[in-house]
Image (cartoon, coloured by chain):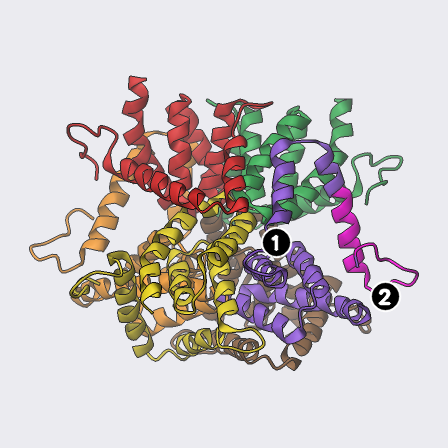
Chain colours: A green, B brown, C orange, D yellow, E red, F purple
Amino acid sequence: MSDTTSGDHTHGSALEEFRTFRERMNAEILGENNLVINRFFALDGRAYEAGALDVKTKELLGLVASLVLRCDDCVTYHLVRCAEEGVARDALFETLSIGLIVGGSIVIPHLRRAIDRWSELEPVRADS
Amino acid sequence: MSDTTSGDHTHGSALEEFRTFRERMNAEILGENNLVINRFFALDGRAYEAGALDVKTKELLGLVASLVLRCDDCVTYHLVRCAEEGVARDALFETLSIGLIVGGSIVIPHLRRAIDRWSELEPVRADS
Amino acid sequence: MSDTTSGDHTHGSALEEFRTFRERMNAEILGENNLVINRFFALDGRAYEAGALDVKTKELLGLVASLVLRCDDCVTYHLVRCAEEGVARDALFETLSIGLIVGGSIVIPHLRRAIDRWSELEPVRADS
Amino acid sequence: MSDTTSGDHTHGSALEEFRTFRERMNAEILGENNLVINRFFALDGRAYEAGALDVKTKELLGLVASLVLRCDDCVTYHLVRCAEEGVARDALFETLSIGLIVGGSIVIPHLRRAIDRWSELEPVRADS
Amino acid sequence: MSDTTSGDHTHGSALEEFRTFRERMNAEILGENNLVINRFFALDGRAYEAGALDVKTKELLGLVASLVLRCDDCVTYHLVRCAEEGVARDALFETLSIGLIVGGSIVIPHLRRAIDRWSELEPVRADS
Amino acid sequence: MSDTTSGDHTHGSALEEFRTFRERMNAEILGENNLVINRFFALDGRAYEAGALDVKTKELLGLVASLVLRCDDCVTYHLVRCAEEGVARDALFETLSIGLIVGGSIVIPHLRRAIDRWSELEPVRADS
């Protein structure tokens, strides 16, 4: 899982697998045209748009909420967005530390996987 | 868990793996003869039997409860039962939409996996 | 809600207090005009409208989801709606029994308060 | 819940109110004769009976599980049982400390209420 | 509950009651000198100190984590701190909206109580 | 038992994978020197040291807390520690049965995986 990232798909297989599955299933879900689900998905996107708070802060809020609720996929999603928004490694760790204090040791396995994901994302950030 | 999957894997490997592991471990757990655990397993079965509410409605109740508590295996189990009871795709999506509204975006990754499982189950239903 | 509360407080003060506080705070929240919150509140209403599943079934789904997530106010809200939709006492208990089996003994205190609320609601139903 | 509290309220009103409400509602729930609910209540009692583990240890297990799931009434119930079984104050605090580490700061408000309840219970223990 | 607070204790009774109980029980808990609990309490304070992220952002993180975990007392505590740090009403609502989207309608009763608390806190802020 | 992994993979790959990933990520996390996280990790270890309660009892408390919070990795960690402390199979099942009663059927998939892990651990115990 670690020394992956060969040739072309630079971003690591776990992350790629997450993205591919996420996109495929979102398409299938939205294609069903269930009004409540489709509006919720749209609203989910709106919640993180810039307003009184900037996008970076909102992504950190989404990240810590996902961490204490212990949802790996949600954490991964917000880590990707945090990387895109240029969140620094120390700011990331401080955010995760608040999630750890609030949520307790039960959060640790998710913290491990979060840092593992982040390691896949940092090279991407360095490129951008 | 591995040596399962006979002939054609019509029903999908994820579902087969779930079933095989579930049956093997249930047998091992019940074989221990812990009175509380064994009675709980029996009671778990009774809860979904027909009464004032029919079986189909009860399975939808089990499904939405499993979804908001975000347990993939429990969701899978109730999806299998819903397919067996002939739940239609639109009724399924409406049930899941209530789980999504009640439980929030944290439910979405489980929703994706639920729909992925359902795709494996629908051909089975079509046969029956 | 307000136009209730006739002479004697037949319907119980706990229920009245819930309704009054709920309406006052909903008004204050919606008055802020936060787009995401206001749309979510609207969507929350849509999720329980009749579709492939009827309103009564959807309210039972909302009830069991609220019970396993152990939210007293949410349980109270869906109990009120179940009473309005004419859910019978045995159907109610079967729904709650599924919540109890799925959620475990941790659900019991909420089950007690649910039944206490239901006792306030049944005379209302008898009137209607 | 109201017509409780006899003579001196030595044991504290919060604890008395909990006990009275619990007994009244349990009676109403069991009186409905829903098979699944009634069997679950019976099984709930069996789980804490002496076996390979003694009753005191089992009550500590029930206490820590209730604390991390953040159910005040469940915590109160197990505190009463722990007091009856003669659990010492330092053993109690060590049990709660594990709940705090596992569950995080979100547990603290429940920890406060637990210690407040325990203060009502200790004089009872001293009497017995 | 609304038009309370006459004369001296301007900040509202619900908030005052929370503070008094919190301080009294914290003193009793820390007085027990359980090493794990006392160190956890100290660490809990450290997590919100300024670092790569400023104090205001960290309090918003603590707030959203508390909201999705649905702990009223934790929400109240962070609301008090947010008021002290000068968080504006629109920034507060955006933070809560993320909690609502992530956590779902189950969060709404806690959202109502949060806004009710905030109304008690805003006059305090205006004074400072 | 920790520095295991002899020639043949008798102890099962799932357990080994858990250990390797856990150690690698813990090292990376602690290497970041975030004060809050590092102190939390240290405190997490202290919580299970012998005091008024012995280590074995504390590990059972950690196990049941992990089970009702449904964290597979946390359950696995405490199972490993329980095996090291010589917890017997019937005591283990009684602990898990309390977790099942408190947490409900949603716990069952984690119970299955727990027993599967325990089967990998028992030969280790027999050796020691």
The number of numbered discs placed on residues in the rendered structure image is 2
Q: Residue furthest right?
A: F7
Q: Image height check: is B4 above or below D104? A: below
Relative depth, front residue between C111 and B126: C111
Residue that mark 1 sits on: F48
Could you tell me which chain the residue with mark 2 belongs to?
A: F
- Pointer 2 and pointer 1 on the same chain: yes
Q: Which residues are magenta?
A: F2-25
| Residue under the image location 49 percent in, 39 percent down | E41
| Residue under the image location 33 percent in, 40 percent down | E113
CB under 8 Å between discs 2 and 1: no
| Residue under the image location 86 percent in, 57 percent down | F5
| Residue F107 forms part of the magenta stretch | no
Quarter of the N terminus of chain E within the rendering: top left
Q: The residue tagged with tag 2: helix, strand or loop? A: loop
Could you tell me which chain the residue with mark 1 belongs to?
A: F
Kind of residue sitting beneath label 2: Thr
Relative depth, front residue between C49 and A41: A41
Q: Image height check: is A67 above or below E3? A: below
Task: Answer whether residue A27 is visible to the viewer in this image.
Answer: no
